[in-house]
Image: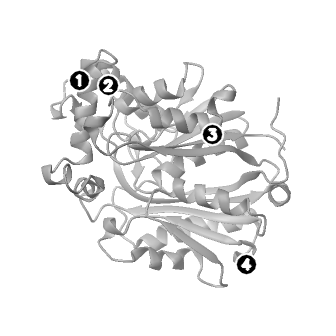
Amino acid sequence: MAFSPGENDIAIVGVAQTDAHARFEGPEVVLIMECVNRLLSDAKIERDDVGFTIAGSCDYLSGMPFAFVSNVDGMGAWPPVYESHVEMDGAWALFEAWLRLQMGDIDVAMVVGSGKSSPCNAREVFHLQADPYVVAPLGIDPDAMAGIQAQALVNAGKASEADIADVVVRSRANASSNPHAQLTDAVSADELLAAPYDMAPLRAHDVSAKADGAAAMLIARRDRALELTDSPVWITGLDHRIESHHAGLRDLTDSPSTRLAATGAGAFDGDVDVAELHVLHAHEEIILRDALGLDDVAKVNPSGGPLAGDPVMATGLTRIIEVAKRIAGGDATRGIAHATSGAALQQNLVCVLEGGS
């Protein structure tokens, strides 16, 4: 049965994303402008039609304090508008915008996620997310923690190195039809398994391809959404949960926070046609599939996912955009998108999307 929206329901009415650039020579604000100008043009609205803007980015990537303030130029600093920012992926900015619209005093919001990671070493930057007293002094960065998690998964008999390689093979194959992807070359499992270890049992190709890029979307309350588009994609559930940052207190072979977020968002209340997962290390797809109860019917990461292009701080929002595009285009009826932050799937967000009008 098609979703029937109520007065306070919120829909995605426009999306835009840049290519995943291995290195973008211009400033981050140009990436944002590319998305914002396309959003407003496609929706045929002006900046003063938007009642709230919010961005997700990370100042540490560019090494400039309050760099996010300059990004406001890309969204348009005039006319004055309610504005906010999260030092998180744009998916968490969407969460705040989704709540903001439910207050009912405005009806359109713009969400942006952006990052320019090429000037820095992301492994050194996101190492700072670790607990500063016990874990951070050890120098364990997110990729090292992912290697520990992957080894725990293999030791538990829940996956093999061949299973992890299969995730990469499928991601690259799916990315061949994604014009925004960074890595689209076909690879074989035998070829991947012959490569040297990086963080055993992970190899270099098991880690997402860091990129510069941006993504943006317009969301609107029901009545305005139906005015702006003939194919609204409804956000029927959105939730996020967090686990301890002490890896020793967690079962690294499972992701209970993903399962809790999915339950809160209503992901298990219907069939899933498509799922886009924020997989930064190949073995994470195996853990997330189990936590989300995804069967072989659901298409997982048909865009290729982050393993084929990871525009840091826009990657999670891009997962939601990829699902929305398929629902708006009629290729799917109901889908889920996932975003993550922190080492070894510490914090997870799940968004449930459905078509209907």
Which amino acid type corresponds to the residue marked 3 in the rendered image?
A: Ala
Return the x and y of residue 50 as percentages of the image width and height: 71, 71
- Give the CA separation, mark 4 to mark 1: 53 Å
CB within 8 Å, label 4 to label 3: no
**In the displayed structure, does residue 70 sit left or right of residue 283?**
right
Does label 2 or label 3 sit earlier along the sequence? 2
CB within 8 Å, label 2 to label 1: yes
Does label 4 or label 1 sit earlier along the sequence? 4
Residue bearing the label numbered 3: 265
Q: Nearer the viewer, mark 3 or mark 1?
A: 3
Q: Nearer the viewer, mark 4 or mark 2?
A: 4
Residue bearing the label numbered 2: 165
Choose between 326 and 257: the one closer to the eye. Answer: 257
Look at the numbered disc 2 and give the secondary structure of its residue: helix
Does label 4 or label 3 sit earlier along the sequence? 4
Q: Nearer the viewer, mark 2 or mark 3?
A: 3
Return the x and y of residue 81 as percentages of the image width and height: 66, 79
Which amino acid type corresponds to the residue marked 1 in the rendered image?
A: Leu
Which amino acid type corresponds to the residue marked 2 in the rendered image?
A: Ala
- Give the CA separation, mark 2 to mark 1: 7 Å
Residue bearing the label numbered 1: 193
Residue under the point 18% across and 31% down? 200
Does label 2 or label 1 sit earlier along the sequence? 2
Does label 4 or label 2 sit earlier along the sequence? 4
Choose between 307 and 34: the one closer to the eye. Answer: 307
Q: Nearer the viewer, mark 4 or mark 3?
A: 3
Residue under the point 73% across and 78% down? 48
- Give the CA separation, mark 4 to mark 2: 48 Å
The C terminus: image quadrant = top right
Look at the numbered disc 3 and give the secondary structure of its residue: helix
- Residue 205, image quadrant: top left
Q: Which mark is residue 48?
A: 4
